[in-house]
Image: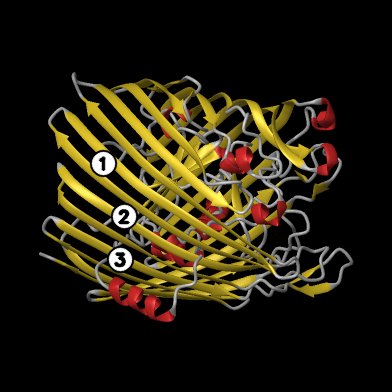
Amino acid sequence: MRNEGYGLLSFIGFCRVPVIELPMKKRLLLLSLLVSPLVRAQELDSLHWLKQVNVQGSRIAYPDKTIQHQVLDTTEATKILSPDVAAQLTRESGVFIKSYGQGGVATVTSSGMGAAHTALMWNGIKLNSSMLGLYDFSLLPSFLLDKVTLQYGGSGTLQGSGSVGGAVMLESETEKSESFTATIMSGLSSYGGQQLGIQTGLTNGNVSTNSRVYLRKAKNDFTYKNQYGETVTQKNADSEQEGFTQELKFGQEHNNISMHIWYLTSDYKIPPHMLQANSYQQQKDEAQRYALTWNFKREKSVFTMNAGFVQDKIRFIDSTALLDERSRARSYQADGMYSLYPLKYWQLDFRVTAEKSVAITDAYPKEETIDQLTGMVRVDYRKDKLNWNIAIRNGVANGDALPLLPSVGVNVKITNALHVRAEGSMVYRLPTLNDRYWQPGGNRDLLPEKGREMSGGLIIEKQVKQIAVAAEAGVFDILLDDAIVWFPQTGGVYGAENIQQIHSDGISGSVGIKAGEKKWKGELQFRPQWNRSIITKTDAANASSLNKQQIYTPQIIYKGKATVAYKKLRLNYYLNYSGYRYTVSDNTKWLEPFLISDVTISYERNFGKINLLFTAAANNISNSNYQVIANRAMPGRNYQVGMMVRFLERKE
């Protein structure tokens, strides 16, 4: 985002994703309506692998064994101590999070590609901003979600525009078994951090409901060392966030309708960077999201229909510059798929997707739109040791033909413990509305970015008595043509052009070792990655960036986690390393590597139908002074404590 290269001015740079200040009476009414039905009970004493998963049937998604996936830890303790998806991805995943500091913007770099090259899906609905193409992951509260799945590598055939470097899929659910649940969560953290969550749920016969309310605020007034070695307190960094989700599900397993609602407001003051004395900037966001899914299953077929509406409002204020800029973006989405099982081991999928994006801002001459209509056909074969699939997608956007998008994948089981997987697909990204229509600098004649991606890996899964090992060694390669870049033109005005080719390749790995018996359990995880992401073609004016590593894309990152658990007591140690990050395109300036360690502890106790959970964390325990983004301060050693009370009554 800020300094991402996809926008101009502070308005684009600080875009988060949506507020409109609600009167207090409306807020209280909202809370009273939501303190009804939900909470999904989760096992807190189980150690599980974050590995590939295969989802079929109930939602339009394709996490399969030919593409590398990781399911993040969404236990209740993690939801307290990693309060947003950005924090979860920072600790656990193999992606790099571009963080502007505590309470600041956080975007994703996956497989060496930019923030606009990662697709974000929520219950089958795309959330990427049609104006910016990216999303601020710090605005996604973990408490409001049940499942977070990370796809490494893009697939334009499956996710459409923007899925170049990877995809993040968010899901919210209702309780399946007949039950009533209620939960209250609270947490405190350094620098004035407070959070509160309320969850209620009811499943009775063919009807399930799930409601959650979430509140979070912080001062974010930590101290840091500036470029002169002086201790400085961060100013103008207060943040507040309020939101709720509502899930309703009607019907049986073979024929059901589910509804999802997500409302979120955020009010963030934007602190000065380390070269500024003060900042008087502020951003207010409001996001509304609605999704409706119908699943109808028969003996040899499944029909799934998704419909969704997303609206993001942004208000950027800078009192010193007399700015008060507003924008509104809306997205209407519909997605239908018919899956047929004509023969044993075979599956045929036919899918049609339509999307209309509309936006207006002070920098557009008028309201602008993007219309997309695409179709896909996919063949999948699964038998014992062999799984392969082939698919093709095509369509139009604003009347122009989109690139043809074929894909192919294969997973072969060589032995009971060893798998080999490989996949490849074409990828693309449409120009955003800002790329085309922002004034000055927008270019209506921009072409879609297009290219191809490939990946492969060896997977080992072995269990011997009380010890289990899961490991993968993989490679990836992405080539993207007609990459859109904003660069200075005549008169110093920035403009958007298709002038670059980007080539990103690398080696990734993951190793997990799990051991335990009835009382004691232990787990080790390690996820390293080497990535070369370079600009292989550009125009003469930008020749100094040719064959140079992309800015804020470290060549080396690795994450680690060690867990020891005794009965209901659990201790986690997290390790996060990032290598050099270049801050200019000719690679003459850079940020030093950093190594950050966190420790968390949780304890759980049951009293009949009531479950108590206590958590605590010490973050950046070495008190490292580091920056992820140049001149954006990061907090030193800091602490968190939290508590959750959960009531669960199941019908016998």
- The secondary element bearing badge 2 is classed as strand
Marks 3 and 2, how far apart in space? Answer: 10 Å
Q: Which amino acid type is marked by label 1?
A: Ser
- The residue labelled by disc 3 is 211
Determine whether, in the image, residue 553 is placed left or right of residue 177.
right
- The secondary element bearing badge 1 is classed as loop
Label drawn at residue 260: 2
Determine whether, in the image, residue 446 is placed left or right of residue 522.
right
Question: Disc 1 vs disc 2: Cβ atoms closer than 8 Å?
Answer: no
Q: Which amino acid type is marked by label 3?
A: Ser
Residue neighbourhood size for the residue with mark 1, other residues' Cα within 10 Å, grouped as few (<14), some (14–19), many (≥20): some
Residue neighbourhood size for the residue with mark 2, other residues' Cα within 10 Å, grouped as few (<14), some (14–19), many (≥20): many
Q: Is residue 85 above or below residue 463?
A: below
**Nearest to the observer: residue 501 or residue 195:** 501
Can residue 224 be seen in this snapshot? yes
> At which x and y percent is residue 295?
21, 41
- The secondary element bearing badge 3 is classed as strand
Q: Residue at the spot x=44%, y=77% of the render?
A: 23
> At which x and y percent is residue 651?
12, 65
- The residue labelled by disc 1 is 58
Q: Residue at the spot x=50%, y=21% of the render?
A: 403
Can residue 612 be seen in this snapshot? no
First-in-chain label (1 vs 3): 1
